[in-house]
Image (tube, grey):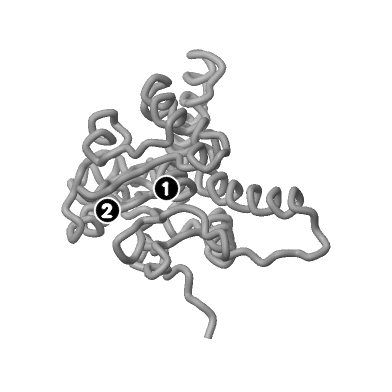
Amino acid sequence: MSEQVITIENRGAVEVVSLNRPDKLNTMNEPLIQALLDYFTGLRERTQVRVVVLRAEGRAFCAGLDLTGWTPDPDASAISQSWRTQRMIAAVMQAMRKCPQPIIAVAQGPACGGGFSLLLSSDVRYAAPDLRMNAAYIRIGLGGCDMGASYFLPRLVGSSVASEYLLTGKFMSAEKALACGLVSEIVPHEELLDKALALAGEMLLTSPMGLRLTKDALNLNIDAASMEHAFALEDRQQVMLGQAGDFAEAKAAFFEKRPPNWQDR
């Protein structure tokens, strides 16, 4: 029987995706990466799923790359095989940013290399007290900038803190991550999922299109060419959303003192 490398639990408009290789510290083998890539890419067409919670089974979130977990191609060069692995993992991080659903990550134990980047690629992060993260690549003779770390980390914590960790590969504790704003809160391990689901529930109180476009604007405006570009995108989104049926429903619900009945239209 093949390994079930991820599990997906549907909770209505929320899906809980769990890395499921606890005996291997959820390290990234080819089936795991393919499963994550298929899942996050497919979310673009599954707007009935409104929020995703990303978690992991066992004592580790993800301890990095499983060096023995990739199928070698005897006809390919070492460079070609390495390039394929590199681009396949990078595509997961990109798919996470491009999918319209907010991703709430909850993590415990080691989150190394690609595991660190899975957290950086998420929208909100909650940490167990024992969470330890690092950009491990520089400690094995490679560069510290990999899997989106050099893009995400400076934008999340600033260039000084990012440089400190990317140039050394040293571990960042949960306390340090909280202090520099990389995680929203430190939560006991057994309460992580409930914390994420509570936040997901708050997100579900918003209109479906409004939630999707808010993630879109946040991502685009991180790299806005100017303040004017950022305002222009926000203005266009608000005018468009103001013509949607859910905006009329929100106004009616406000005056009628009832929860809105979102139709995603």
> In front here: 214 or 99?
99
* Image side of residue 151 versus residue 156, left or right: right
Q: Is residue 251 visible?
A: yes
Name the residue located 61 percent from the left edge and 49 percent from the top edge.
Answer: 91
Q: Secondary structure at mark 1?
A: strand
Exactly how many numbered labels are in the figure?
Answer: 2
Query: Is the residue marked by circle 1 packed among few (<14), some (14-19), or many (20+) residues within 10 Å?
Result: many
Looking at the picture, how far across and down is residue 20, in whole percent?
Answer: 41, 68
- Give the Cα separation between the discs numbered 1 and 2: 21 Å
User: Circle 2 is placed at which residue position?
Assistant: 196
Label 2 is placed on what type of residue?
Ala
Residue 53 in view (yes/no): no
Q: Position of residue 226 (x, y in %)?
A: 53, 14
Measured along the vertical axis of the image, is residue 139 above or below residue 150? below
Q: Is residue 72 left or right of residue 206?
A: right
Residue sitting at x 27%, y 40% = 173
Residue 71: x, y in percent?
67, 67
Residue corresponding to mark 1: 112
Q: Residue furthest right?
A: 75
| Badge 1 amino acid | Cys
Crowd rating for badge 2 (residues with CA inside 10 Å; few <14, some 14–19, many 20+): many
Whether tag 1 and tag 2 are in contact, CB under 8 A, the answer is: no
Q: Determine whether, in the image, residue 118 is placed left or right of residue 33.
A: left
Q: Which mark is residue 207?
A: none
Indicate the quadrant where residue 183 lies: top left
For mark 2, give the secondary structure.
helix
Q: Can you give x and y, in whole percent of width and height, for residue 172 in the image?
A: 32, 37
